[in-house]
C-alpha cells in the first residue's frame, strides 16, 4: 500500500520560493510511474501542476512552467517541488500524487499541505 | 473560469439517481478517452471513482458509472446514499496536461 506525505513550510513570503517534498513509503519511486503535484486554492477546484518520472522526464502546467522545478531523490524515495516568485494566488493546499504510466488517473494522494503566501 | 464546465450543484433523495455533466471541447473530452471523476469529502484529498470514461478502480461501488458523448462526459450515481454527499470533479487530458472541472457539490436531501 503506497503512502505519500507532503512536508514543507506552511507560510511563505511573497516573491520567495515555495519548496515542498513528498516522501513515498510502501513503494519504490524508481518504478514506471509518474510522481506529481496538484494544488487546490481554498474553496476552489484542484489545479494540476505537473509530474516527474524517476528518469527525470517532466511535464509541467503551461501556466506555471516558467516558475516550476521538480526533482526526484531515489536514494530517499522522495520527490520535490519548487515554485518561484510566489504571490497570494499561490496560496493553496498542495497534494503530491502518484500516476501509473499506463493509466490516466491519480491513484494515490497525500493528505495535502496548506501553504499560505503572506508577509 | 475552469477548463471543463460542471454544474455547481446537484441534489437528490436517498435511493434516487443523479447525473453530473462535464463539458469540454473537441481538444480534450471529445478527442481522448481519458476522463476521470474524483470524489472529495471535506478536509480530504480527492479519490478517483471513475477513470478512462467508464472504468471503476477496485473497491469502488458499481453505483458509480461514467459515460461520454461528444465533448460531454457524465457521472451517474444510482441508489443515492447519505455518504455520497461530497464534491465531484471531472478531469480530462489535453496536450499532456490534466484539466479539472469546476466541481459539483452533491447534496443528499
Image (spheres, coloured by chain):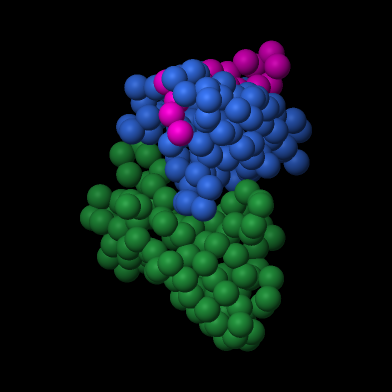
Chain colours: A blue, B green
Foreground: A88 or B7? A88
In the rendered view, tell whether residue B49 sits above or below residue A24.
below
Instruction: Please indicate whether residue A29 sits to the left or right of residue B7 in the image.
Output: right
In the rendered view, tell whether residue B61 sits above or below residue B39.
below
Residue depicted at 23% across the width and 55% down the height:
B26
Instruction: Please indicate whether residue B103 sits to the left or right of residue A109 in the image.
Output: left
Report x, y in % for residue A22.
64, 27
In the rendered view, tell whether residue B82 sits above or below residue A57.
below
In the orientation shown, which residue stands out farthest toward the front?
A119
Residue depicted at 60% across the width and 24% down the height:
A20
Tell me, yes or no, if residue A15 can be seen here: yes
Foreground: A80 or B62? A80
In magenta stretch: residue A77 = yes
Instruction: Please indicate whether residue A23 sits to the left or right of residue B51 in the image.
Output: right
In magenta stretch: residue B107 = no
- The picture quadrant where one finds residue B40 is bottom right
Report x, y in % for residue A38.
51, 39
Give, as a single range, the part of the protein colored magenta: A70-88
Tell me, yes or no, if residue A31 can be seen here: no
- The picture quadrant where one finds residue B6 is bottom left
Amino acid at each position: 500500500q503506497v503512502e505519500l506525505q507532503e512536508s514543507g513550510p506552511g507560510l511563505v513570503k511573497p516573491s520567495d520560493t515555495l519548496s515542498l517534498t513528498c516522501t513515498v513509503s510502501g513503494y519504490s519511486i524508481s518504478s514506471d510511474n509518474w510522481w506529481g503535484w496538484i494544488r487546490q486554492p481554498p474553496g476552489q477546484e484542484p489545479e494540476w501542476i505537473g509530474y516527474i518520472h524517476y528518469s527525470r522526464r517532466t511535464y509541467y502546467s503551461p501556466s506555471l512552467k516558467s516558475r516550476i522545478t521538480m526533482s526526484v531523490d531515489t536514494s530517499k524515495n522522495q520527490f520535490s517541488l519548487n515554485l518561484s516568485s510566489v504571490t497570494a494566488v499561490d496560496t493553496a493546499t498542495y497534494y503530491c500524487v502518484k500516476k501509473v504510466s499506463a493509466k490516466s488517473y491519480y491513484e494515490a494522494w497525500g493528505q495535502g499541505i496548506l501553504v499560505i503566501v503572506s508577509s | 473560469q475552469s477548463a471543463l464546465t460542471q454544474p455547481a450543484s446537484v441534489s437528490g433523495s436517498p435511493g434516487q439517481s443523479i447525473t453530473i455533466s462535464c463539458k469540454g471541447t473537441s481538444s480534450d473530452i471529445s478527442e481522448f478517452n481519458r476522463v476521470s471523476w474524483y470524489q472529495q469529502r471535506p478536509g480530504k484529498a480527492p479519490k478517483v471513482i471513475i477513470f478512462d470514461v467508464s472504468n471503476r478502480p477496485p473497491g469502488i461501488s458499481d453505483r458509480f458509472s461514467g459515460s461520454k458523448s461528444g465533448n460531454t462526459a457524465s457521472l451517474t450515481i444510482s441508489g443515492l446514499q447519505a455518504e455520497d454527499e461530497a464534491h465531484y470533479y471531472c478531469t480530462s487530458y489535453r496536450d499532456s496536461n490534466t484539466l479539472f472541472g469546476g466541481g459539483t457539490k452533491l447534496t443528499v436531501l
